[in-house]
Image: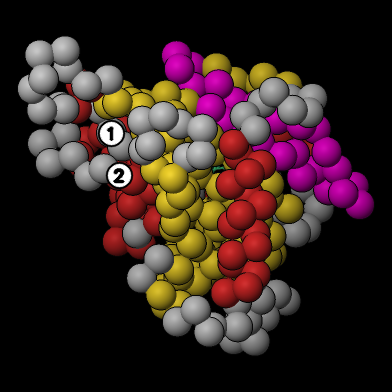
């Protein structure tokens, strides 16, 4: 229902985050901190009240899948346990619409930090890329922290993180010369993954940056490999 109280916020943040993701790493002082093949991970070192909240921007190119397929597997709750290794618990708290859900997630305790949980709305959407002549849609998923009385921040068990995440996917197609149907060999997905996570409680900067350096490349590699394996023998979802 577009009359849901959160829709105005969902539309506004989604628009902002998709614009921010579309800028790539040209804007702002991004520091390359991890590189593996076509995956490049950048961060900006930022602290808020002594808490490390380094914004992260990862750019990756994956052959053989579409942006819609990437976003489908990132958004849909039924697959998350298969690729999110740091999850201990995941609940769909509310279904706002077919493409907007509210999740509560408890993440595994990562030494030396205390256990964390997150409460966020997640929205999957697509836009026709204004300056892309193939006129293939850009698909994106935006996850943004929210608050609900049923999930108080102070719950004695976990430290509540706040996060804003955007998975932004462009599909590039090179139609075969001989006019045969487009196959998975002819499609490439250009991914920009942006995330800002406020850990919610104090973690030593060096420890948190070490966790980021280990967890983010692992997460993006595992997630993209998962989507490739899930879609390999499936018809292409454009
Ligand atoms: O893209 S999503 O929406 C996918 C749905 O799950 C997403 C991604 C990342 C997080 C998350 C939550 C907590 C932490 C930290 C903060 C202090 C201690 C734990 C981190 C940091 C540690 C980094 C990290 C990166 C990737 C995966 C897990 N861990 C990340 C949550 C959601």
Tell me which segment is drawn in magenta. Answer: 36-59
The C terminus lies in which quarter of the figure?
Answer: top left
Residue shown at 71% from the left, 39% from the top: 55
Label 1 CA crowd tier, 10 Å (few <14, some 14–19, many 20+): many
User: Which residue position holds label 2?
Assistant: 69
**Residue 101: which quarter of the image?**
bottom left
Q: Does residue 188 appear anywhere in the picture?
A: yes
SS assignment at label 1: loop
x, y percentage for residue 176? 17, 17
**Up-down relation of residue 31 to residue 214 (above or below):** above
How many marks can you see? 2
Q: Residue at x 18, y 39 (%)?
A: 236
Who's the residue at 16% across and 27% down the image?
182
**Dot 2 crowding, Cα within 10 Å, few <14, some 14–19, many 20+:** many
The residue tagged 1 is: 65
Looking at the figure, which quarter contains the N terminus? bottom left
């Amino acid at each position: 229902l577009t009359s849901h109280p959160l829709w105005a916020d969902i539309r506004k943040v989604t628009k902002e985050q998709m614009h921010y993701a579309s800028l790539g790493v040209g804007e702002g002082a991004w520091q390359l901190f991890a590189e593996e093949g076509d995956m490049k991970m950048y961060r900006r070192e930022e602290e808020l009240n002594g808490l490390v909240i380094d914004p992260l921007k990862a750019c990756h190119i994956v052959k053989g899948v579409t942006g819609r397929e990437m976003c489908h597997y990132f958004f849909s709750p039924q697959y998350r346990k298969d690729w999110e290794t740091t999850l201990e618990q995941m609940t769909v708290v509310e279904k706002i619409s077919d493409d907007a859900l509210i999740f509560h997630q408890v993440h595994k305790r990562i030494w030396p930090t205390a256990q964390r949980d997150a409460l966020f709305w997640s929205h999957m959407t697509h836009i026709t890329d204004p300056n892309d002549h193939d006129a293939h849609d850009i698909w994106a998923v935006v996850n943004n922290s929210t608050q609900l009385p049923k999930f108080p921040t102070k719950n004695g068990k976990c430290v509540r993180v706040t996060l804003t995440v955007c998975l932004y996917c462009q599909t590039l197609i090179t139609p075969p010369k001989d006019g045969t149907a487009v196959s998975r060999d002819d499609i490439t997905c250009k991914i920009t993954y942006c995330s800002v996570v406020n850990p919610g409680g104090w973690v030593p900067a060096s420890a948190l940056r070490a966790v980021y350096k280990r967890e983010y490349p692992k997460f993006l590699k595992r997630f993209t490999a998962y989507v490739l394996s899930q879609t390999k023998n499936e018809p292409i979802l454009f």
